Structure formats: structure tokens, C-alpha cells
Image (cartoon, grey):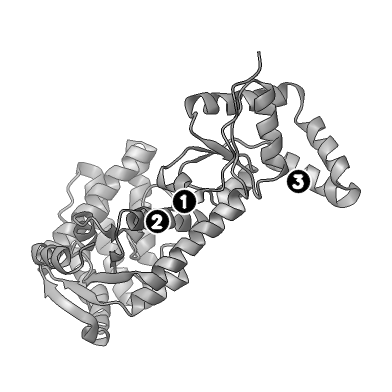
Amino acid sequence: MSPPPLRQDSADYREIFLHDLPLIDTRAPVEFNKGSFPNAVSLPLMTDSERQQVGTCYKQQGQQAAIALGHELVGGKVKEARVDAWAEFARTHPDGYLFCFRGGLRSQITQQWLYDAGIPYPRITGGYKAMRHFLIEEIERAARECDFTLVGGMTGTGKTEVLAQLDNAVDLEGHANHRGSSFGKKASPQPPQIGFENALAIDVLKQRHSGSNRFVLEDESRLIGRCSVPLSLHRAMQTSPLVWLEDSRESRIERILKDYVIDLCTEFENTFGGEIGAQKFAETLRNNLANITRRLGGERYQKLDTIMHSALTQQLRDGTVDQHREWIAALLHDYYDPMYDYQLEKNGSRILFRGNQQEVVAFLREHCRI
């Protein structure tokens, strides 16, 4: 019995990303780990070692010898296991596609082996390289064609909370899996730079497809942890108007306490297990403080580290977090607020509006609508 007809291979990258179509990434794990697409899973034709051997053979003996070695390395039970994995994905995701780096030999072989197993499955013409280029161009187009309004404000005013209430917001920190400050590291790792850019571009693509050409973003430096905002977008942000979010020092301390201490500790515990997670959380918090020693000055750092160590000891002992307020308040007064005062003075001419969270959200909904 012949296999059912094959869906056509596709180069319609826009539709693929707009509809979150599932993808088989047949590239080697090392390539996948450098960055892929949100809906892609790594089901490689070759392992890193196999790919390296085939690449060396190609350079020394040519394409035919490399292909022969590839079939030798990925044969028998190894081939059977990989075809089974692709087939399981294809049956579970009949609307998906497979791809390799350029849409060439690796995806063609994968497609052929699946077809031989009775499962026709389409591939993406141009592969990863073409899809990646499409997404880079999407960011470039948005930077040229769209309007941006930035939400600024002192640390702890709840800028991310404002974005969550808007339909046309782009959460850069969410895509970077980092809060953007020196204390922004989370329990889970940040995505690779390419993965960050791809997810960001897809977000913008979807919003523009729904009719939005006016976006609200948080006022960020170019680096969010180790993820770098695309240069064209960041340049557009630097000249965009600002809305300044205000809140009391007391409210800001409580928000920071919740986000950076209580919730973050819970996140570490859920990720690594109770006791180990709590210890990792404590180490991370103290390392974050140590990373800004130079800016704080040695004496101020030692004072804050002593307070933080005492607060963490009490928290890990009985769950009490009250002592954390002391180092948070000192850090705001001595470190963060002076930096924001400088930025506020420097960028004051760009500020359209100032207000509390409710007022800022209302302003943005009225004046920065889709």
C-alpha cells in the first residue's frame, strides 16, 4: 500500500510562524542549542560527533564519500530509532514540517526515510537559514515602520505589570527570561541570543498581523542579562517617547521583596527542590550583589552583604523575610535611584506623561492604541 500524498514543501515562513506550526529540527544538537524556533524540537539526523565525522570526510574526500559515511554511521538500529522518533512526531503533529540548515541534504534524507516508512512529511524550503533571515528582516521592518512608546520608572515601580495589562506590549524581559537588572537572574536559564531574537520577532510578527503598528515596551538598556536587544530596535527605542511610572518608596520595596525574594526563592525551590533550591537562591542573590561591588564601593558592599547574609539566614531558617527590606531600601537609596535620577534628567524632554500604575495604563490605552 503506497503512502498517502505528501503535503507540499513550504517556503511560506509567515504562515508557519503565525500559526505556530510544529517543526522538526534535523540539525545536530550543537546547532539547535545555539538557537532554533519556539515550536521546534530537536530530532537530529546526526549527533554532533557523527556530523563532525561526516564534515571531516567531506572536506578530505568529497560529497559522495561523506554521504556514504553518513549512511554507515546512521544505519541499522540507529536509523530505525531515529525514523521512529520522527514518525511519532509526524503522527502527533500532522500539520508540521521538518527542516535542516539550508533545506538541503539532511532534510531531504529525513523526508525520504519517513516516506519509505509510509509517512509523507513536508520540509521547509530554504531551511533554518531562510527562516532566520525572514525573522531578522521582520525586526528590521518593525524598527523602521512602527511607533514605540517606552515605559520608564524607578526600580520596583511595576513596569512589567503595566505591560501585562496592554494588548500591544512587547515584553523584552519575558523573552529574555531575565528581569533586566543586576538582580534579574531567574532559576531557569536565559535562551540563547538567537532563540531570544527569534521569539521576539515572532511576537512582533503576530501583533503586526493583527493590525498593531504601535508598541509599548519597557525602557531597557541593550543588554537584558546576556541577551542583546537587536540593534535596529534598540536604536528606535532610544528616540521613542517615554511614559514615566511613579510609585512610593514603600510600595517599591514591597514589590521588590515579593518579586526578587519571596517569588524567586519559590521559583528556585520548585526548579531544584526545596533545600537545594533555597541554597541556590541565596547564592544567586549574594552573587548578584557581589557583581556590583565596583559600583557600590567596597565599604558599602560589605555593609549590604552583611545585612543580606543575615536576612537570608533568617529566611532559610524560619521563612521570615522582614530583614530583606533593609538591604532593599539601602540599595534603592544608594544605587538604583541615583542612576534613574540621572536618566530622568537626561531624558526628561521625551516624557509624555507621568503617573501611577492605573493612570499610566489608562494613558497608554488611550494614546498608544493599536
Q: Which mark is residue 56?
A: none
Compare residues 291 and 22 and report the one nearer the observer: 22
Measured in 3D between alpha carbons, the distance from the residue under mark 1 to the one under mark 2, in whole angstroms, is 8 Å
Q: Is residue 305 visible?
A: yes
Q: Kindly identify which numbered label has been placed on residue 52.
A: 3
Q: Residues within 10 Å of mark 3 (few under 14, many from 20)?
A: few
Counting labels gives 3
- Type of amino acid under label 2: Leu
Q: Residues within 10 Å of mark 1 (few under 14, many from 20)?
A: some
**Residue that mark 1 sits on:** 14
Quadrant in which the C terminus appears: bottom left
Q: Secondary structure at mark 3?
A: helix
Which numbered disc flags the more N-terminal residue, 1 or 2?
1
Whether the residues at callouts 3 and 2 have beta carbons within 8 Å, the answer is no
Q: Residue at x 59, y 22 (%)?
A: 4
Q: Which of the two residues, 13 or 148, is positioned nearer the viewer here?
A: 13
Q: Is residue 182 above or below residue 55?
A: below
Q: Which residue is mark 2?
A: 205
Mark 1–mark 2 CB contact (< 8 Å): yes
